[in-house]
Image (cartoon, helix red, strand yellow):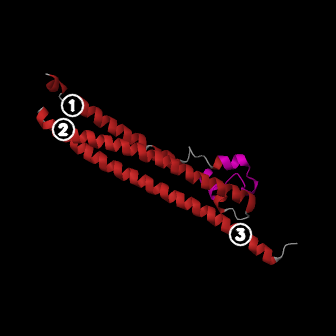
């Protein structure tokens, strides 16, 4: 029969492992949030500058007045789109890292701990914080996979609308700029 000293060491070991896994989640999630914030800020700046340049181009009368705004607009649009493409890919990869750490913690809590704080939270979240229908002690691998829906969390769905929204804004501005530019004056 295990002694009290052995039980204390086991609990400390379990808590250390759970703390390590939670620290991994925190680390990756903080990077994910930083990448998201950086993307929103950089895109907001690029789009604001793009709107100013586009409006200046659109309000100019002659081709000689439009070109000084069209060229910087094209540069800002290219840099903005490249940045958006790069950062959205980085965010997707960082979200996968968060999922990887969360899955490890869910599996660890499911098989080792009696205090299943993360499982309890994820189960409550799954049920919109109503009394959960699942008991943390009886979770199966399928239940754990259900708790880890990397493509369906509400926060990711909401944030996921930003990237297509930014692409749509760039598309509208670029197409409007192309339509507004006096191409006939160049080829005349």
Disc 2: which residue = 57
Disc 1: which residue = 180
Horizontal relation, residue 54 to residue 132: left or right = left
* Quarter occupied by the N terminus: bottom right
**Residue drawn at point x = 52 percent, y = 48 percent:** 93
In this view of the protein, which residue sits in the foreground, 133 or 57? 57
SS state under label 2: helix
Q: Count all numbered tags in the image, as a single digit.
A: 3
Q: Residues within 10 Å of mark 3 (few under 14, many from 20)?
A: few
- Whole-angstrom CA distance, mark 2 to mark 1, is 8 Å
Kindly indicate the quadrant of the structure image that contains residue 163.
Answer: top left
- Camera-near label (3 vs 1) is 3
- Whole-angstrom CA distance, mark 3 to mark 1, is 67 Å
SS state under label 1: helix
Question: 69 above or below 29?
Answer: above
Kindly indicate the quadrant of the structure image that contains residue 183.
Answer: top left
- In percent of width and height, residue 67 lies at 17, 36
SS state under label 3: helix
In this view of the protein, which residue sits in the foreground, 131 or 20? 20
Question: 72 above or below 105?
Answer: above
Residues drawn in magenta: 121-145
Q: For residue 71: magenta?
A: no
- Whole-angstrom CA distance, mark 3 to mark 2, is 65 Å
Confirm or deny contact between disc 2 and disc 1 (CB under 8 A).
Answer: yes
- Dot 3 or dot 1: first in sequence order is 3
**Residue that extends furthest to the right in the rendered view of this protein:** 1
- Dot 2 or dot 1: first in sequence order is 2
* Quarter occupied by the C terminus: top left
Disc 3: which residue = 13
Q: How crowded is mark 2: few (under 14 residues within 10 Å), some or many (20 or more)?
A: many
């Amino acid at each position: 029969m295990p002694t009290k000293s052995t039980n204390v060491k086991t609990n400390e070991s379990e808590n250390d492992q759970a703390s390590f896994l939670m620290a991994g989640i925190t680390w990756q999630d903080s990077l994910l949030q930083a990448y998201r914030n950086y993307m929103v800020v950089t895109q907001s700046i690029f789009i604001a500058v793009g709107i100013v340049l586009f409006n200046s181009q659109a309000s100019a009368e002659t081709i000689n007045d439009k070109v000084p705004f069209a060229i910087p607009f094209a540069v800002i649009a290219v840099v903005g789109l490249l940045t958006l493409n790069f950062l959205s890919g980085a965010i997707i990869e960082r979200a996968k890292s968060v999922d990887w750490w969360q899955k490890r913690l869910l599996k660890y809590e499911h098989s080792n701990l009696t205090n299943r704080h993360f499982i309890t939270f994820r189960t409550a979240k799954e049920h919109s914080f109503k009394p959960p229908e699942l008991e943390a002690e009886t979770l199966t691998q399928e239940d754990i996979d259900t708790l880890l829906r990397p493509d369906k969390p509400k926060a990711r769905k909401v944030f996921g609308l930003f990237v297509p929204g930014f692409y749509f804004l760039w598309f509208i501005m670029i197409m409007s700029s192309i339509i507004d530019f006096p191409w006939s004056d160049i080829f005349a």
